[in-house]
Amino acid sequence: MSRKLNRFFLIIIWGLLLIGLIAFQVDMIFLSQPAKEEPAFKKGDIAPDFVLLSLEGKKYQLAELLKSAPVVLVFFSSLNAPSRIEIGELDDYIKKQKEPSFYVVLISDQSKNELIQFKNELNLSLPVLYDQKGKVMSEYKIRVLPANFLIGRDGRVIYGQYGSEGFNIYRLQALLSYSGSGAEEGGKR
């Protein structure tokens, strides 16, 4: 009799575990919504100024760039496919413009060698800024890559986005034309 009782309890325990596992999966699949990553800076917030060096050793300061045109900050990883696609599109667009109405700077905390290889691999004309200690990425509270910020000439955030939800040149042009950012006045990259 005790064997039958042990077997009965074993079946009950396994059944309860199975029911618990199924309930957990149902909750994960159907009831839980993924947390949406929102940029730390909202429209109208003042963007933190920074100074970084490009891979070629040229100094870039956000405040200086903003004196002549809005700036798109692209925080990226060379290993991230959406980053690569986005950067390729932006670089192609800038290469075709005689006088772009905005700057684009790429920012990463990857090793300098990885960034040089990435820039050469994609034949980029855009400046790649080396955030060696991740200070700027920390100031902008970057948690997801790619992350993009469009900064108006007044130093305020026009748009911010984490992840790859479709930041492209068409969205950028629309944001610039409707923001009153001074982009229409032009500026050389």
Image: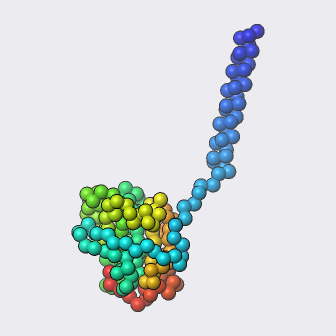
- Residue 68, image quadrant: bottom left
Q: Is residue 102 at all visible to an observer of this figure?
A: no
Q: How many marks?
A: 0
Residue at the spot 67% in from the left edge and 38% down from the top edge:
22
Question: Residue at the spot x=34%, y=76% of the render?
Answer: 61
Q: Which quarter of the figure is the C terminus placed in?
A: bottom left
Q: Residue at x 40, y 77 (%)?
A: 71
Q: Give the residue at the far left of this rendering.
A: 56
From what the image shows, is residue 33 above or below residue 107? above
Question: Would residue 9 appear left or right of 59 to someone viewing this image?
Answer: right
The residue depicted at 37 percent of the width and 61 percent of the height is: 134
Q: Quadrant of residue 36?
A: bottom right
* 120, 108: nearer the viewer: 108
User: Farthest residue in the right direction?
Assistant: 1
- Can you say which quadrant of the picture contains the N terminus? top right
Instruction: Using the rendered view, name the quadrant where residue 34 is placed.
Output: bottom right
Looking at the image, the residue that sits furthest to the top is: 1
Residue 144 placed where, x, y %? 47, 59
Where residue 117 sits in the image (x, y, percent)? 26, 59
Q: Is 62 placed left or right of 23 in the picture? A: left
| Residue 136, horizontal then vertical, whole percent | 39, 66
Image position of 79 with respect to 182: above or below: above
Q: Is residue 32 left or right of residue 70?
A: right
Q: Is 187 situated above or below 91?
A: below
Give how far across and how far down residue 30 sits, in percent.
66, 50
